[in-house]
Image: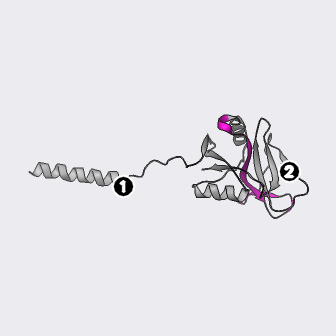
Amino acid sequence: MKGLAVIVLAAQLILVAAATLQPLEAEPPNVISLGTVDGKSYYYNKTLRSWFNSRAFCIENGMQMATIETVSQAEFLKSRQSLNAFSGYFEIAGRDAQIARQFSWDSTGEALTDIPGLPFRLNGGALDYRTCISYLASESPFLNIKECPLAGYALCQI
């Protein structure tokens, strides 16, 4: 009888331990994975949204808007162009820093820096404030300076 009690107790401990284990993190919902580079996992969604709504989408799905801070990240995203319909304008975390022609990353406040092979282009005339950055996924990608309300797709990262 003692042996049976020990087995039952051991089984109960195993069940309690199993119940407290954290499940593996699942891929965020409603997004397509592009893969990982420099410790960042990039995801996108092909629903048109303003910069502000794209930011909210990323946050609501446990992510943040994407940043592109290194040559390897820029080359990685360029290599994914045409993969799973990854083409078009994608909202990223760049926004105006409340100083004309100055941009910062929304998530860190750090200034955007020039990345070789990924130029900035102005979409429209004299845009001074309420401007945001989108990434054009194409064979010749660039960072698009635009008015924040103009719609693009969400590009998020974890």
Q: Where is residue 27 in the image (x, y as percent from the top left)?
A: 53, 46
Q: Position of residue 157 (x, y in %)?
A: 63, 49
Classify residue 138 as left or right of residue 83.
right
Q: Which mark is residue 123?
A: 2
> Looking at this view, is 15 or 54 the one in front?
54
Tell me: residue 21, above or below residue 129: above
Q: Mark 1 points at which residue?
A: 20
- Residue at 14% in and 52% down: 5
Give the crowd class for mark 1: few <14, some 14-19, many >=20 residues within 10 Å: few
Q: Which residue lies furthest to the bottom in this view?
A: 98
Classify residue 9 as left or right of residue 76.
left
Q: Which residue lies furthest to the right in this view?
A: 125
Q: Can residue 146 be seen in this view?
A: yes
Q: Position of residue 71 (x, y in %)?
A: 73, 41
Measure how far apart labels 1 and 2 are at the Cα level. Answer: 52 Å
Q: Residue type at mark 2?
A: Asn
Mark 1 or mark 2: which comes first in sequence? 1
> Looking at this view, is 51 or 13 the one in front?
51
- Residue at 78% in and 55% down: 150
Q: What element carries label 1?
A: helix
The magenta stretch spans residue 86: yes
- Residue at 59% in and 58% down: 60
Q: Which mark is residue 115?
A: none
Q: Residue type at mark 1?
A: Thr
Query: Does the residue at mark 1 contact the one at mark 2 (Cβ under 8 Å)?
Result: no
Q: Which residue lies furthest to the front in this view?
A: 47
- Residue at 63% in and 56% down: 57
Classify residue 32 as left or right of residue 75.
left
Q: Where is residue 29 in the image (x, y as percent from the top left)?
A: 55, 49
Bounds of the magenta segment: 83-112
Which is closer to the viewer, label 1 or label 2? 2
